[in-house]
């Protein structure tokens, strides 16, 4: 019996993949119970999973299929808001959040983490768990949290119940990527883990091998939980720094009239050293890349008593936070600084294409600037029904209607319906010549040329060649720009 604590973007996918694991005869290896809080935010996730539906919007048919099959056919996936479930578990997987209260703090010493929810979650586990159950923490935590926060809480709760048996505890960070390869990013991905002792590590290995294709994606066993905790923070800081680094080259390339996408694709061919260099873009959002580096900095000051300041890393987060302002500048340029009263359509508010997660969306800062400038803002996203962080904003679903109403269009996320727009489709949807900023390489060069020929004015993040061709100016009557 595996109990997954937290049915959010990570836990619901983990529950599905673990429930989908089969033995040699095709029978389920595990009976899985997903647990979320008895709160308004938790109940609907529990009810959705019970109904065989993924609790979070998932564009991956494999994930939906795994859940439906486990709930309806094999009946080995259940969900509850009752903490009694922990008492049934052989393995308890912790997938609850642990965030930063003040991510914009200027001084690293002022950073404050939201540890209460994590502590409370672990305490519930300690209160209910079987003495011999394995607790596997997948939550991204500060370095040292398993041994210095989770372990004492679990010990305290178990001691209260008179449990003296050895405790099995480990950390194995998640690399799950919500999106088209959601389930695959758990099943078919390398995993690093570490236990508090050899016995915990051995049980964790056995559990991970039961649902990950470890023949093709071998496990990395690290020396101690701090290594696994630090690994996650380092991985995400590396990605955040890569994005910030590329952003300053984006600014340079635009001024030089260079198409940076073309350059980056050529650089990416150098496999092994440069194949994951970032591409130009609108900004960075989501739950993880905006906070994980801050957890590392907090660990240094509060758990390691270290004076190390992760300067490059923290600066990358600042650059990434400000990045959407560059798109705002491009839009201002197209509008000759006159945004007041203009209808601006922002296409995409999630943090990734084909994903519904709006946490820390870079569109928020962009929207604030548009509103300050007096623009009339329209927001469209094909994946997002509501924008919980901006309940004041109604997210539109009818792209054609939005395009008809817009005087300026900004592609902020590369969702498929935007990438599938054709030149005739765009011209038909928005018959009056419009302004367009492509911040995510949504529009190809032929479409851009066609739009400009039809009277549109365009700029693109990383698209210095558009600027060089004069797409930012109106095409003169005689045909020349
Ligand atoms: N979202 C991602 O793509 C991703 C990827 C890798 C790692 N992570 C990490 O995984 C962790 C979870 O992230 P998420 O995106 O799934 O968060 P989330 O907010 O989508 O989901 C967390 C869920 O945990 C529930 N919860 C909180 N306290 C609980 C408790 N005591 N008992 C039961 N349920 C409880 C919440 O109600 C929520 O539904 C975080 O540490 C995150 O950094 C996230």
Image (cartoon, grey):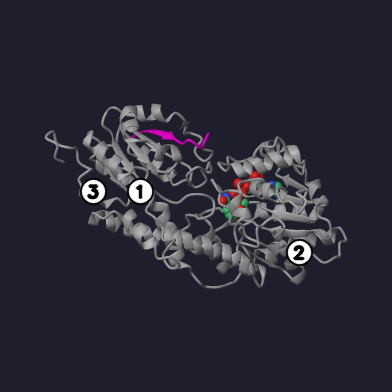
Where residue 213 appears, as percent x and y from the top left, is 65, 58
Name the residue nearer the viewer: 327 or 188. 188
Q: Is residue 199 above or below residue 459?
A: below
The answer to whether the residues at label 2 and label 3 have Cβ atoms under 8 Å apart is no
Q: Residue 200 placed where, x, y %? A: 75, 66
Give the residue number, with chain letter if any, for mark 3: 467
Residue stretch rendered in magenta on the structure:
375-386
The mark lying in front, picked from 3 and 1, is: 3
Return the x and y of residue 322 as percentages of the image width and height. Answer: 39, 52
At mark 3, the secondary structure is: helix
Q: Is mark 3 within 8 Å of ligand 1?
A: no
Alpha-carbon span between mark 2 and mark 3: 58 Å
Q: Can you identify the residue that label 1 sits on?
A: 325
Kindly identify the residue that appears in the image at 63 percent across and 54 percent down.
Answer: 187
- Residue 339 placement: quadrant: top left
**SS at mark 1 in the image:** helix
Pointer 1 or 2: first along the chain? 2
Density class for disc 3 (Cα within 10 Å; few <14, some 14-19, many ≥20) is some
Discs 3, 1 touching: Cβ within 8 Å: no
């Amino acid at each position: 019996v595996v109990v997954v604590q937290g049915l959010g973007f990570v836990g619901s996918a983990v529950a599905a993949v673990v429930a989908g694991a089969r033995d040699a005869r095709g029978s389920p290896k595990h009976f899985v119970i997903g647990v979320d809080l008895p709160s308004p935010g938790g109940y609907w996730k529990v009810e959705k999973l019970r109904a065989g539906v993924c609790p979070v919007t998932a564009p991956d048919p494999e994930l939906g299929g795994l859940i439906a099959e486990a709930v309806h056919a094999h009946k080995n996936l259940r969900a509850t808001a009752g903490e009694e479930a922990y008492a049934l578990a052989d393995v308890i997987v912790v997938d609850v959040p642990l965030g930063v209260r003040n991510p914009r703090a200027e001084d690293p010493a002022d950073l404050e983490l939201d540890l209460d929810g994590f502590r409370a979650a672990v305490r519930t586990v300690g209160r209910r768990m079987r003495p011999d159950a394995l607790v596997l923490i997948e939550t991204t935590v500060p370095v040292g949290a398993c041994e210095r926060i989770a372990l004492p809480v679990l010990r305290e709760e178990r001691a209260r119940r008179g449990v003296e048996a050895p405790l099995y505890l480990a950390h194995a960070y998640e690399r799950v990527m919500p999106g088209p390869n959601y389930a695959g990013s758990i099943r078919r991905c390398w995993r690093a883990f570490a236990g508090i002792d050899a016995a915990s590590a051995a049980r964790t290995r056995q559990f991970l091998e039961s649902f990950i294709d470890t023949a093709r994606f071998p496990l990395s066993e690290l020396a101690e939980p701090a290594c696994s905790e630090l690994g996650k923070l380092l991985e995400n800081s590396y990605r955040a720094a890569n994005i910030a680094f590329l952003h300053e080259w984006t600014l340079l390339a635009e001024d030089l009239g260079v198409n940076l996408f073309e350059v980056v694709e050529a650089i990416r061919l150098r496999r092994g050293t440069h194949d994951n260099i970032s591409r130009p873009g609108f900004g960075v959002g989501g739950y993880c890349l905006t906070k994980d580096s801050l957890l590392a900095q907090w660990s240094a000051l509060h758990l390691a008593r270290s004076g190390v300041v992760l300067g490059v890393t923290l600066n990358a987060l600042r650059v990434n936070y400000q990045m959407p302002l560059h798109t705002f500048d491009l839009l201002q340029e197209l509008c000759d600084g006159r945004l007041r009263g203009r209808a601006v359509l922002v296409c995409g508010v999630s943090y990734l294409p084909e994903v519904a997660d709006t946490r820390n969306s870079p569109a928020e800062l962009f929207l604030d600037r548009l509103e300050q400038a007096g623009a009339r803002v329209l927001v469209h996203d094909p994946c997002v029904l509501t924008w919980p962080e901006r309940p004041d904003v109604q997210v539109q679903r009818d792209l054609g209607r939005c395009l008809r109403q817009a005087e300026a269009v900004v592609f902020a996320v590369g969702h498929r319906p935007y990438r599938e727009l054709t030149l005739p489709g765009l011209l038909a949807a928005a018959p009056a010549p419009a302004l367009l900023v492509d911040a995510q390489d949504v529009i190809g060069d032929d479409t851009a040329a066609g739009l400009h020929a039809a009277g549109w004015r365009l700029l693109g993040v990383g698209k210095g060649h558009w600027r060089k061709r004069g797409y930012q100016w109106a095409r003169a009557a005689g045909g020349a720009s």
